[in-house]
Image (cartoon, coloured by chain):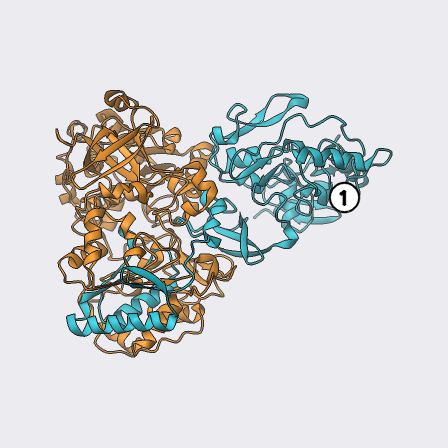
Amino acid sequence: MDAKPTLTLDGNTFSFDPGETILEVARRNAIDIPTLCHLKRATPTGACRICVVEVEGARTLLASCATPAADKMVVHTESKKVVQARRAILQLMLSSGNHNCAVRGADDQDWTAFQLKVQQEDRATALCPVWGDCKLQDLAYRYQVSGERFPAEASRYPTETVNPFIVRDFSRCILCGRCVQACNDVQVNHAINFGYRGSETKIVASGDRLLKDSNCVFCGECVQACPVGALVEKDVRYHHRPWEMRKVRTTCTYCGVGCQLYLHVKENRVVKITGVQDVPPNHGSLCVKGRFGFDFIASEDRLKKPLIKENGAFREATWEEALGRIAENLKEIQTRHGADSIGVLTSARITNEENYVAQKFTRAVLKTNNIDHCARL
Amino acid sequence: MTNTIGDIEDADVILVTGSNTTENHPVLSTFVKRAVKFKGARLILVDPRKIGMAEFAHVWLRQNLGTDVAWLNGMMHVILKEGLYNKSFVEERTKGFEELKKTVEQYPPERVEAISGIPAEDLKEAARLYATAKKASILYCMGITQHITGTDNVKSLANLAMLCGHLGREGTGVNPLRGQNNVQGACDMGGLPNVYTGYQPVADLAVAKKMETAWGVTGLSTRPGLTVTQMMPAAHEGKLKALYIIGENPLVSDPDLNHLKKCLEQLEFLVVQDLFLTETARLAHVVLPSCCFAEKEGTFTNTERRVQRVRKAVDPPGEAKDDWRILCDLATRMGYAMTYGSPQEIMEEIARVTPSYGGITYDRIDDVGLHWPCPNPEHPGTPILHREQFTSGRGKFHAIDYLPPAEAADAEYPLYLTTGRVLYHYHTGTMTMRSKGLNERIPGCFVEIAPEDAEKYGVQDGDAVKIRSRRGQIQAAVKVSPKAVVGTIFIPFHFAQAAANTLTHAALDPVSKIPEFKVCAVRLERAA
């Protein structure tokens, strides 16, 4: 059997399977090549060029996400040339929009004027809504770039807030195209794409309509894919910061697909939901219900105490009294009419453990097999 | 599902029927869409409505409501006649082929066209596509099962898959899509009148003995109990005196609601344990507050039989309690001590008494869930069923004849009604209607009607109409849509205010006891 082909990354030799990209081989071996536009499960576009590497013998720097590994290739992932290129790209990105985090420097310009301009456009008094949760910001720190040149004019396209779920802030869009790929290549909803040209380029929905009037189904895949602050959940934006939330992994409560998700919790409230990347069955994808349908958890309508009906109206009761009432009635009916005069409807909504306990209770205590649930409905 | 969700992307041909996948299983639908768009898979869609999936379909067959056995027999007729079936699979792994052959001989495409409305040529094309694929997967949902012939429909799909050998391999299978987060688990756990956990029959004395020993009780009943659709009439007749309902809202989800309400009112004692004071809970004598998924530990089993963890993120409101704790407290109070310390302890007991869950532990499923059957702690789980053989050895073909739906349109009720869900809501809406964004997208009930019918009845988008069936009437707004087929209207069943199930027919499939939600006859009038 022939030995596997190998390449050298930063002085170490690694084997690879034909077809693997330089980025894939690097990631598999814990070598951190930064990416922005690269989206797993979509065809690499090489658009942002932040992942460029130096390949010996190549005329130019190559985008590692789109370059297949080749036998005997010698690659430098953080050479001087590479770092220079990345700094230049980040510089351009940072100066292209309202990236008002602390990394944004001012140099000879007026930092305060810039912040004020952005905050006025945003109608906000805080720094960027994704401060601390932004790939561009992370990379700017990593490569110590501050984005000196910024445009004096207002952003070309106004922020869109007229749907219940997603805010589209074009002033922070770096046109990396991850959202376009998330929509077209991962969810295959065909709702958004690149529109217009050159400096007018904009991510447009169904021929530049509002999301709510487009083919958008609000799955939020684009929000999860956005590396910057261009697409943010409406209820999260300027309300909840990442460091205020903790994440709990669980399984979605809606359909039977069983998507793996993170509940983001702040002060005993679920305030945001995201899909868990890289694990089956959903590999990070969610639908509108799974991602945005969580208000019910903290609804004021939730039942908070047992209720007992008396003379046609409910009154609150203690658990002691309510359970006592139930035990008494069930026992009495069991004695008077036999075990099969009682039925239990367990639930397709509750856990396996709870269903198990429900059928055990029905069979071992009530002594009947009259148990079913709404599988049929 | 016989196969996994991920597997769908490996199929060469995908047959989707009775599933509005993009709205009801949106994330799963992405696997189908990616297979079609990027991997060259061909999609056969059989559905009476022009649903979102139609945009991706190579062949879209629009059958008349309730004619599934006919078109499936017709496909098999073509496959046999053209010699496209998998002879070795049929010989080595199945039985009953001759009987099937005799029956499907009676279904030439021309006859099927007369019954189903599917053009003979289209049916032939679909049959050839499915039969000649290397790997073909069938996905189906309630559009197949919610008929008086639901069991026959499912068996016919299995016939088709076995005939072509599209089972037991990657990218194949007969795959029901489960509509609720843990409907698979509720069945697996014995939340059914005829089986204990892992489908161990209650009528089997050896099983009963085993459970009696495990639970330390005597006198477990070996008589199968009543299904939900049998309990309601039993309540009406006074045979069922008490009902304990956990996390369900039959007063919106069940058929023929006017009648159902009378049934529930006959009960001497009704307990409802839920998150909210639902339509059903309002009728109860005692209502108990329970926890939602974000407030509890445990597991759900998804549609691909994968057992996955549920974890507590927030504290429940007020005095709401875990469903298992409530039931344990009640059992203990009634003289049988149930004292588990945690859901994990319950899972350990489940694994002990359930062969198919024998190897499931919280440790093993901490990151990625396992597919049952998983009989022991070393077993890797079973993503694909029926690889070497079927559970009962050889797969049995069922020779099945077409039967028309229980109710036909007539002069008095000239339109057909079919029901389902929409993307933005879920079942009876107790959760989604309390999420403001979802409500903003679809704020209320609507009647989806074909442009031709809208013209015929002189109605436009937003007009209020009355829909009447033999069982009741509701009022809702018109939504003219190319999704609808002429002569058939669609109403989502989520909305208690205009509950589609006031209209639906409670006729049941004789085996599964599933009601025929997908077909009934109605009349449409402008609301005054």
> Which is more toward the observer, B133 or B189?
B189
Quadrant for residue B269, please give it.
Answer: bottom left
Q: Which chain is cyan?
A: A
Q: Note whether residue A62 is visible.
A: no
A331 or B29, which lies in front? A331
Indicate the chain on which mark 1 is placed.
Answer: A
Instruction: Locate residue A46 relative to residue B257 in the image: left or right.
Output: right
In-image side of B257 versus B5 (left or right): left
**Which residue type does callout 1 highlight?**
Ala
Q: Which residue is rendered at x = 55% and y = 38% of the image? A: A166
Residue B119 visible from this viewpoint: yes
Q: Position of residue B521 (x, y in %)?
A: 18, 35
Chain letter for orange, please. B
| Secondary structure under the numbered disc 1 in the rendered image | loop
Place of residue B129 in the rendered image (x, y in percent of width and height, measured from the top left): 31, 32
Residue at the (21%, 43%) spot, across then down: B516
- Which residue is farthest front? A311
Can you say which quadrant of the picture contains the C terminus of chain B? top left
Query: Residue visible at 35% across and 32% down?
Result: B51
Q: Quadrant of residue B306?
A: bottom left
Q: Is residue B114 left or right of residue A2?
A: left
Residue underneath mark 1: A102
